[in-house]
Amino acid sequence: MKLGDALKISKRSLLLTAGAVGFIAAFVWLLATRGPLAPVGVETATVTRADLRPDVYGIGTVEAQHAYTVGPIQAGRVLQVLVDQGDLVQAGQLLAEIDPVDLRQRTEAASSAAARARQAALAAQAQVAEADSRARMAQANSERYQVLYRQNFVAKEMADSRRHEASAATAALTAARANAVGAQREIGRADAELQGIGQLRNSLKLQSPIDGVVTAREAEPGTTVVAGQAVLRLVDPARLWVRARVDQARAQGVVVGQAADIVLRSAPGTALPGKVVRVDLQSDALTEERIINVAFDPAPAQLYLGELAEVAIQLPGARDVLTMPRAALAQHNGRIGVWQIEQGLTRFQPVQPGVQTVEHVQIVSGLQAGDSVIVYSAKQLDDGVRVREQRLTPR
Amino acid sequence: MINLARRDIAHHLKSYLLTGLGLGLLIGVTLTMAGVYRGMVDDAKVLLRAVDADVWVVQQNTLGPFAEPSSVPDDLYRALLGLEGVAQAGNVAYLTMQVSHRGKSQRVMVAGYEAGKPGGPAFLVAGRPIARAHYEAVADARTGFRVGDVVRIRRNDYTVVGLTRRMVSSGGDPMLFIPLKDAQEAQFLKDNDAIVEDRKRLAANPAVNRPGQPGVLDAVQAIQTSSHKVNAVLLRLQPGMDAHAVADTIARWQRFTAYTSNDMEEILVAKLIATAAKQIGLFLMILAVVSAAIVAFIIYTMTLGKIKEIAVLKLIGTKNRTIAAMIMQEALGLGVIGFFVGKFAATLWAPAFPKYVLLETGDAARAFVLTLVVCALASVLAIRAALRIDPAEAIGG
């Protein structure tokens, strides 16, 4: 064999070996990084001491603290509506009027009845005077006959008859007096009825109970409304708040006076300052939410009722506590804890979490400052899984 | 004794390697097809594994939230929590929909769950879990969303706060986890036009809008726009409890249908993806048979191409055994090269598929054995042909 041939063959086999080694290396690399033999990639974080400022989040709508519904107290037809939506009104201002229909005629009838009662009272008074005069006359006659009877000038029968006339006239006087009092009372009744009709007429004039703004005009002239139905709705623009609904599970610790950020749907980028002013005693049992009223502090110039708003109520924070990222919190076999790496394998460490913020969670027990915990993993973790720290997502 | 196979291969190295490469790509395709099949079955199970529920409670006489529509009241969980052995109960709502992001529409399965209860993502690869009661989302990384992205579902914008991986529906759509209340709203909320039209329709209906009863219309409208339904309730049991017994109790006394997680897996695999899986499975079988046939033909023709050389070998008195060993070794060598190239290729391109491709080690082992068996069988055919060669052909040419 010539030297050249031998060189050629050895060069070729060298190339072949190199190729084979390269291929095997690439194969092993592929299996170890992408294939079933690859360790699960994880990202870790360290448990550190920090201050936590938790908040409670809820959504609600902008509502008026008090909403006023102005309507008639009995059914009627709307005669005129003097204001429209958006108008500012003052307390006592006439807003609308209900058609009185026959109320004017009923007033006249009542006032005639009152006048008649007065006449009747006069007549009764006259009857009293007449009865009085008769009674006095009869009494005098009776006394006269008694004297004559005692002197035996007249028969007893005559004297008794006169006495009877006297007592009958006295009784008639009593009856006439009672009649007169009754007639006086009748005047009072007729006057009251007249006044009542007057009140009714006043009630048909719908007046504003507050200084406020009209939010709805629900009936137009000519509409027939029933008792209690709204013709106009008013609110006090200075007393608007967000009626926020907060999940009961997270509502722990919310009390009146806490500061809150309000974000209106129309301005998603800006947080308006607010304050918790009332926590409703009655929660929503069906949706399992607590109702928390957050007032604007100070109120913005223009608000729209019914607008969706997000509320973040700031709770008292925890100072200098052990914290870790919230994503590290895991559940395993019904227990809460974290995954840790021990010699390249995973191990579950139960912990007791405390205050939670959006990003972080307080560790009450189970970990020390400086401990490393798995935050992210490329797969669902289990006990004793081989893991390797690596970037899981491009930053 | 010299190794004839090595010499022969060294002589035709380039064509031998190229043949091996070609075979490898074919085997790679077959392996990938097996991976597609396995991935499909795995897709169906992945959600079940992730939520890790022992019992699924769904509407009576339905096959659960995935195979059939199901709706149960959202306060049912209170009654279920009272049952003996139930440790945790969580409401879930699932709906498949298009969500838009940066003007691009993306098909996802939206899953509503309550924080801290069963039904949420099992792990994250970035960001944080949902911390607020509304308008936050955790997305599967396959959606292409990133932490901080804003996606629109119906009329609300959701901020993606976390990313997870391998969370897909049985159909392979990536999942988007949002708070349960938002999911309930998204599921039952109509578009604004429909709501306005409905209001008008109701107002025109004299039965609900009577002149004398102004409050009735508002009440009816309020009822129509609220929803207190979820698709299923997931239960986790206390350790040692028999899931079947709990499911039977629920079915008998609560009048809902309850499945253990094994039943649910059966529904998803055997009912929901049955036809598609069979389709892929049949295709896989055909592909495997065709691949085996092609491997056999290639080895056979490769041997037939060497008739002259074999005749010469015979002429110089080489033993039949030596010739047979050469052919057998070359065939097995091709099989080994082909398998490794195929496995390499399949592993390399599997992540590029839009749906999950699961390459199981067991499948690879089976494929390896099958390749060697096919190669051996094919070489037997080729050996028979080679041994029948007349040494005279070497001179006759």
Image (cartoon, rainbow, N blue to C red):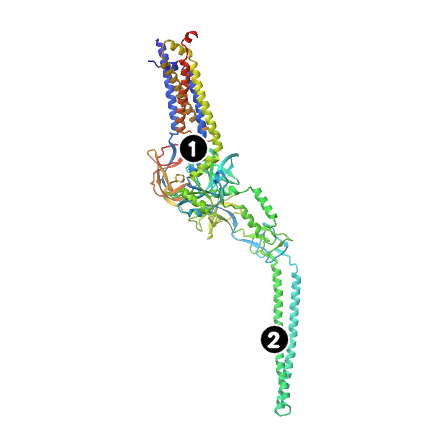
Which residue of the protein is positioned furthest toward the top in this rendering?
B395
Question: Camera-side residue: A202 or B325?
Answer: B325
Residue B320 in sight from this viewpoint: yes
Discs 2, 1 touching: Cβ within 8 Å? no
Quadrant in which the C terminus of chain B is drawn: top left
Q: Nearer the viewer, mark 2 or mark 1?
A: 2
**How many neighbours does mark 2 have within 10 angstroms: few (below 14), some (14-19), or many (20 or more)?**
some
Three-letter residue code for mark 1: Thr
Left or right placement of residue A131 versus residue B183 in this view: right
Q: Secondary structure at mark 1?
A: loop
Give the image location of residue B186, x and y in percent: 51, 41
Query: Is the residue A12 above or below the residue A212 in the image?
Result: above
Residue B128 in sight from this viewpoint: no
Give the image location of residue A233, x and y in percent: 57, 52
The answer as to whether the residues below labels 2 and 1 share one chain is yes
**Quarter occupied by residue A108:** bottom right
Residue where numbered disc 1 is placed: A393
Residue sitting at x 61%, y 68%: A189
**How many neighbours does mark 1 have within 10 angstroms: few (below 14), some (14-19), or many (20 or more)?**
few
Three-letter residue code for mark 2: Ala
Residue where numbered disc 2 is placed: A178
Which callout, 2 or 1, points at the residue further toward the start of the chain? 2
Residue sitting at x 46%, y 35%: B270
Q: Chain of mark 2?
A: A
Question: Camera-side residue: B199 or A250?
Answer: B199
Q: Secondary structure at mark 2?
A: helix
